[in-house]
Image (cartoon, grey):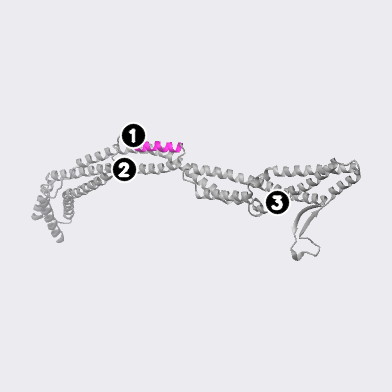
Amino acid sequence: MNLEELDQTLTQWRSELDAIQSNLLGLEDSTIFKIIKGERDQLQGATEQKASKAFEAVDRLWAQFALLDGVYKKAQGLRQNLPTWNKGKAIEDIGQILAADIVLDTEAVPFDQRGLFSGAERQHTVSPKQLKEMMARSFDTAKKVFTDLKSKIEALLQQSQAVRAEAESLKQQAESFGKGLPAELSELMARLESNEKLCRRDPLSVTTDLRLDMRPYLEKARTRVAELARERDKIRADATRAGKKLQELAELYKSALKRDDAAAATKPLSDSLELLNKAVAEGRWEAARTGVSDWNRQAEELRALIIGLRQANEKLEQVKVERAHCLELHKSCELEIENPQGLVAPGGTKSLTEWLDTLTKALPGQRLDALQSGLPDWNRECDQLHTSIESAIKANQRPLDKKKELTRRWAEAQRKTEEYKGRGLVVDKALHTFGDKAGQLMSQSKINLEEADRMIYSYEIRLGEMISKL
């Protein structure tokens, strides 16, 4: 080897060493290397095994680089100090240094494996060329581990971000409904956290697309959020319907009770509806849900009271009509019948009318408890009066019915007499006497029912006897 060849060899060594150092530094400066190194204590499974081997390989490469660099520096130092005399031999010595085997490590030799001339230690040596080839393979292997991890983590991160974006959106929507986080969303977030944790600690063990793994959880969460959305829409619709119901209640109040103070009667509902609409506008759905339920309950209670008062008024009017009828019968009996027996005068409705008016005023006065407890009592009193009036009507109807029946019997007896006269019946003195007396009694302005009944009966008996003899 001459001096020119030596310089070329040294230049090549320097170039290779610079490349090794640059590539190792580039690998260590890569983002994936730093990420894996920072998470090294958290790594598990296949990822931990492969990453550990890759880090060990890098450490080993640096140690091997140092060995090569030491050889180069030794040779370069001798080159810079070549002697004037015997320069050829010095060049050859430097060439031998560059070509000499390099000791990689030394291991102790167990005594039972030693020969007579062997030492207690054994050195593992390789030529510079072999070492460089070994380093190239180690570098490629280590780099591939980090490259594979980079590709895997990027893919998993993309999948995870897609799932998390939707999961966070669903979570935000669910929380906006104000019912706490539903179980389906809790399960989704827990599964996502578990997957992301696995991706951080052992990404190489993840063989399934995260989007496929999370699909069942996302579908359940979507379904639940959709249900909550429908509940929210129903609450909004119920709040809108509440406004219409309030107007209907005011109209019902006015038409049923013939009063113009519906605003006072419905004021609590109006105030509650204002709070309900505010809760809906502010997205306080739990408060709105409770508000709708309470409002509808109060509205139904008010409707029931209005209808109850309307029915009470109708009942009272019916009682008044029947009372008037009862009085009319009573008067008719006194006008048409002499000394009528068993007549009943109906009870008055004044107290019931005043009581019902007081109960009705309790509604706009917001004395609902008094109305709710008093209306059943009023109905019982009204029913009792109604029953008594019905009994009085029957009692007052009996004398008139008796008169009507006597009128029918007397007309029938006269008709039968005329019929049998045509068949040869001759009216005798007794029949004539009974007939005159009955006719007189039935033609009076006030009929004596007992006397008229007795005369008509006597006439019927005598007529029957005479007809039987024809």
Question: Mark 3 to mark 2: distance in Å?
Answer: 87 Å
Say which element carries label 2.
Answer: helix
Q: Residue 95: give its label.
A: none
For mark 1, give the secondary structure.
Answer: helix
Q: Which residues are magenta?
A: 267-281
Residue 280 sits inside the magenta stretch: yes
Question: Would residue 224 be found to the left or right of residue 126 on screen?
Answer: left
The answer to whether residue 229 shows anywhere in this view is no
- For the residue labelled by badge 3, is the local secondary structure a helix, a strand or a loop? helix
Residue 421 x, y percent position in the rendering: 16, 54
Badge 1 or badge 2: first in the primary sequence: 1
Q: Nearer the viewer, residue 261 or 264?
A: 264
| Mark nearer the viewer, 3 or 2 | 3
Q: Which residue is mark 2?
A: 305
- For residue 252, which quarter of the picture? top left
Determine crowd level at label 1: few under 14, some 14-19, many 20+ residues with C-alpha closer than 10 A.
some
> Closer to us: mark 3 or mark 1?
3
Q: Is residue 264 magenta?
A: no
Label 3–label 1 contact, CB within 8 A: no
> What secondary structure predominates along the stretch shown in magenta?
helix
Q: Residue at x 31, y 43 (%)?
A: 305
Spatial separation of the CA atoms under disc 3 and disc 1? 86 Å
Tell me the residue that label 3 is attached to.
56
Residue under the image location 19 percent in, 48 percent down: 388
Question: Label 1: which residue?
Answer: 263
Amino acid type indicated by mark 2: Leu
Q: Is residue 382 left or right of residue 445?
A: right
- Decide which of 181, 408 is in the foreground and name it: 181
